Image (cartoon, grey):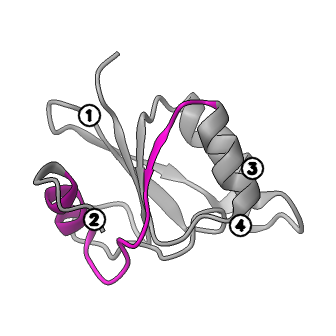
Amino acid sequence: MSEVVAVSSEGPTLDDAVDARFGRAAGFVLIDAAGGTRYLDNGASQAMAHGAGIETARRIAEAGATVLLTGVVGPKAAAALKSVGLAVVEGMEGRTVGQALAAYRQGKGA
């Protein structure tokens, strides 16, 4: 399986800011190994009273993500992400999606 990176984002492009939240992020920019991008809206999870992180983990796994770059992941969501084998890098807030991706690919992480 090739790597697909999901970045929590405040908008649909590489120029949008990383959303510091995971479960209630506005959405996720998904970047494939060839550099192609697509946007996964997270509005349905944002509106949930409980379980947003677990639902979001399910949705990005189903979208094919293998790596997650984000701000902070709560403990229940972290367990859900681990159960589906997603690698998680936290502390990416304060960057654009493109900057977070570049930092990850340069091995700088958070």
Circle nearer the N terminus (4, 3): 4
Say few, some or many: other residues with alpha carbon within 10 Å of mark 2 (under 14 / 14 to 19 / 20 or more): many
Alpha carbon distance from label 4 to label 3: 12 Å
Alpha carbon distance from label 4 to label 1: 25 Å
Say few, some or many: other residues with alpha carbon within 10 Å of mark 3 (under 14 / 14 to 19 / 20 or more): many
Q: Position of residue 36 (x, y in %)?
A: 21, 37
For the residue marked with disc 1, what is the amino acid? Answer: Asp
Q: Position of residue 57 (x, y in %)?
A: 64, 45
Q: Report the side of 16 relative to 90 (left or right).
A: left
Q: Secondary structure at mark 2?
A: helix
- The numbered mark at residue 46 is 4
Q: Magenta segment: does it hold 90?
A: yes
Query: What is the span of residues highlighted in magenta in the rendered image?
Result: 84-104
Q: Position of residue 15 (x, y in %)?
A: 22, 70
- The numbered mark at residue 97 is 2
Alpha carbon distance from label 1 to label 3: 23 Å
Circle nearer the N terminus (1, 2): 1
25 to 17, vertically: above or below:
above
Q: Which residue is mark 1?
A: 32
Q: Which residue is mark 3?
A: 54
Q: Secondary structure at mark 3?
A: helix
- The numbered mark at residue 61 is none
Q: Report the side of 40 relative to 11 (left or right).
A: right
For the residue marked with disc 4, what is the amino acid? Answer: Gln
Q: Residue at x 30, y 72 (%)?
A: 16
Q: Quadrant of the N terminus?
A: top left
